[in-house]
Image: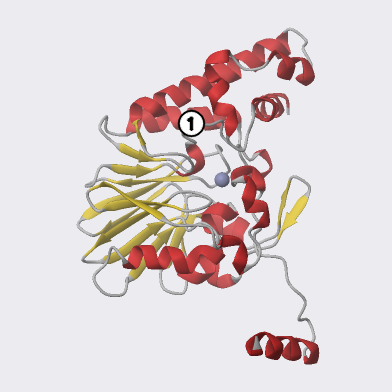
């Protein structure tokens, strides 16, 4: 109480003390519905970080926002994505439970620029070198337009300091960690992260497991490019790979194949409707095939998914 009063007094004496919008406010479309209210420390009190060992050195962390992967070993901690800034203390505590002594953060890889995957960058970037595709740095360091909103840049502490165009390898905790860019898919800066020794791949938002995906057309994404990237990942990855999707539970390549079939079915369906002169409203009224009805319970329902496919195919 005393601390609050002092803070308010300090505010009254200072200029520019009004509450600032959170940097890189995520589009709720790639966040859980409650993410709209993530501003303020109190909003995240109900979030617990669930930790699952996937294989080898790699654990998956789920809280709110995109899934996190961490490699824990003698070289320290390599982290992939970091959810929202207010969750950083809980994420750090969950990682500390996996390490002997305080965690030594060495690298943080961003799979893409969205705020539900990079919100913790200004915190973890103080310890770890942030690695990402060049377009991720470009988008995190400049204002972005998304669905009628301007998203502020992150503070510089949250910008990637190691960028690449096609791929980069980190040799860490006894294995090669390949960060591979997939062009023009979910955004224009997506990478997947292959822990080659552990046999685990963080797919970023190139994979939404059990739900229709968000594809950010304003952020350089494309529906056909997205499907092509998924096909390329299926082709490239060893058959026994364990997958961490950007959102949804961990899975195998079989489930990624089913996801790819859903994508190509959707593209074919909408393309057929467009050729037959149907409007978007008519396409949405006809809907997705019944076998995909379970995928609309995430942030993207069937209407919105068909809208994304239609927008991508008709621009
Ligand atoms: Zn995303």
Q: Residues within 10 Å of mark 1 (few under 14, many from 20)?
A: many
- Image coordinates for residue 259, horizontal then vertical, percent: 46, 26
Q: Residue at x 62, y 14 (%)?
A: 269
Left or right of 17 on screen, residue 182: left
221 and 15: which is toward the camera: 15
In which quadrant will I find the C terminus?
top right
Give the quadrant of the N terminus: bottom right
Up-down relation of residue 130 to residue 133 (above or below): below
Image quarter of residue 80: bottom left
Name the residue located 77 percent from the left edge and 15 percent from the top edge. Answer: 282
> Which residue is identified by label 1?
210
Local SS, label 1? loop
Is residue 83 at least partly visible in the picture?
yes
| Quadrant location, ligand no. 1 | top right
| Nearer the observer, 91 or 243 | 91
241 up-or-down from 83: above or below:
above
The outermost residue toward the top is 276
Residue at position x 71%, y 88% in the image: 5
Residue appearing at x 31%, y 74% in the figure: 102
Is residue 113 visible to us here?
no
Q: Tag count in the figure?
A: 1
Give the farthest residue toward the front.
Answer: 1
Left or right for 51, reference 188:
left
Q: Position of residue 214 (x, y in %)?
A: 60, 37
């Amino acid at each position: 109480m005393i601390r609050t009063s002092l803070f308010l007094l300090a505010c009254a004496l200072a200029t520019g003390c009004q509450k600032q919008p959170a940097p890189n406010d995520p589009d709720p479309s790639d966040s859980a519905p409650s993410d709209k209210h993530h501003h303020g420390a109190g909003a995240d009190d109900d979030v617990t970080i669930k930790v699952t060992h996937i294989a080898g050195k790699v654990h998956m962390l789920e809280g709110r926002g995109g899934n996190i992967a961490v490699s824990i070993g003698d070289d320290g901690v390599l982290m992939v994505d970091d959810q929202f800034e207010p969750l950083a203390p809980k994420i750090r505590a969950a990682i500390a439970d996996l390490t002997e002594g305080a965690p030594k953060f060495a690298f943080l890889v961003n799979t893409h620029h969205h705020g539900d995957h990079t919100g913790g960058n200004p915190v973890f970037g103080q310890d770890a070198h942030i690695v990402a595709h060049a377009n991720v740095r470009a988008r995190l360091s400049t204002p972005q337009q998304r669905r009628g909103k301007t998203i502020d840049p992150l503070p510089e502490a949250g910008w990637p300091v190691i960028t690449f165009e096609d791929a980069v390898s980190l040799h860490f905790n006894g294995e090669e960690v390949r960060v591979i860019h997939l062009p023009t898919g979910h955004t224009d800066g997506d990478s997947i992260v292959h822990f080659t020794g552990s046999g685990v791949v963080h797919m970023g938002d190139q994979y939404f497991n059990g739900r229709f995906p968000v594809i950010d057309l304003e952020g350089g994404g494309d529906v056909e490019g997205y499907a092509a990237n998924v096909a390329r990942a299926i082709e490239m990855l060893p058959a026994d790979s364990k997958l961490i999707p950007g959102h949804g539970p961990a899975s195998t390549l079989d489930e990624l194949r089913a996801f790819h079939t859903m994508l190509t079915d959707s593209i074919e369906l909408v393309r057929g409707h467009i050729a037959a002169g149907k409007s978007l409203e008519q396409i949405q009224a006809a809907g997705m095939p019944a076998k995909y009805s379970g995928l609309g319970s995430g942030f993207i329902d069937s209407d919105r998914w068909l809208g994304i496919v239609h927008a991508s195919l008709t621009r």
